[in-house]
Image (cartoon, rainbow, N blue to C red):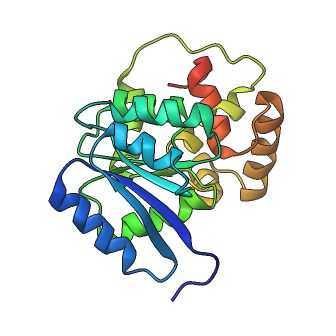
Amino acid sequence: MRGGPVIRIGIAEDHPLSRRALVQLFEAEEDLEVVGAACDGSEALELVHDGREPDVLLLDVRLPDLDGIEVARKILEERPGLAILMLSAHDDHEYVAEAMRVGARGYVLKTAEANELVQAVHLVARGHLVMDSKVSGILGEKRAQEQEPAPKTGPLTERELQVLRQLAEGRTNRAIAKRLGISPETVKAHLERIFRKLGAGDRTDAVAQALRSGLID
């Protein structure tokens, strides 16, 4: 049993069986309420604009009329505070990077376990950045394979860029600290400087700005 306020969820999934299964999954949780289930991008836009006011929108990357990422872009231009969690069968690097560029707070694969999906909804509702572990691994491999010149660092130091890259892969402060061999307190200090230099309000905003500006890819 979870405490706290009820999280209102909108769902955009074009497959009827999958859509119904998602509704049943979330409605079984005491602190989750499904306020609408759309079958395409147009209905997803309507769901957000017709007064149902979801806190989290679970948005399939592939929708029959509008691309899910384009739907996310349109919605976040008007409601930048809405938590959008992308759901996809695709773990392609480009899909993930574009989703984060437009401001999505998370990217979860359809192969995720039910409890992982529920947890992801709770996390993005609280402002966290969520990345499927399989997607994080793919991003890391992609970066390691690329033989491109180092990106311009702008106002960020090399260590701050390292922290930012780890952040973009969905790691917690403790996981970043372990990965880089520094303390969680040092990670926190780096993040505070990163937010200040980028003018970012939170972790998601920092990653989105860094992707848009080419500081990370």
- Asked if residue 43 is positioned above or below residue 21 in the image, the reply reads above
The residue lying at 50 percent from left, 30 percent from top is 74
The residue lying at 72 percent from left, 56 percent from top is 183
Q: Position of residue 174 (x, y in %)?
A: 63, 60
Front residue of 188/42: it is 42
Q: Position of residue 72 (x, y in %)?
A: 46, 36
Residue 210 image-quadrant placement? top right
Residue 199 image-quadrant placement? top right
The residue lying at 55 percent from left, 53 percent from top is 51
- Asked if residue 22 is positioned above or below residue 140 in the image, the reply reads below
Q: Quick one: which residue is furthest to the bottom in this view?
A: 1
From this viewpoint, is residue 138 visible?
Answer: no
The residue lying at 43 percent from left, 80 percent from top is 29
Front residue of 35/200: it is 35
- Asked if residue 184 is positioned above or below residue 94 in the image, the reply reads below
Q: Position of residue 3 (x, y in %)?
A: 61, 84
Q: Is residue 92 left or right of residue 180?
A: left
Q: Quick one: which residue is furthest to the top in this view?
A: 149
Front residue of 98/195: it is 98
- Asked if residue 41 is positioned above or below residue 126 in the image, the reply reads above
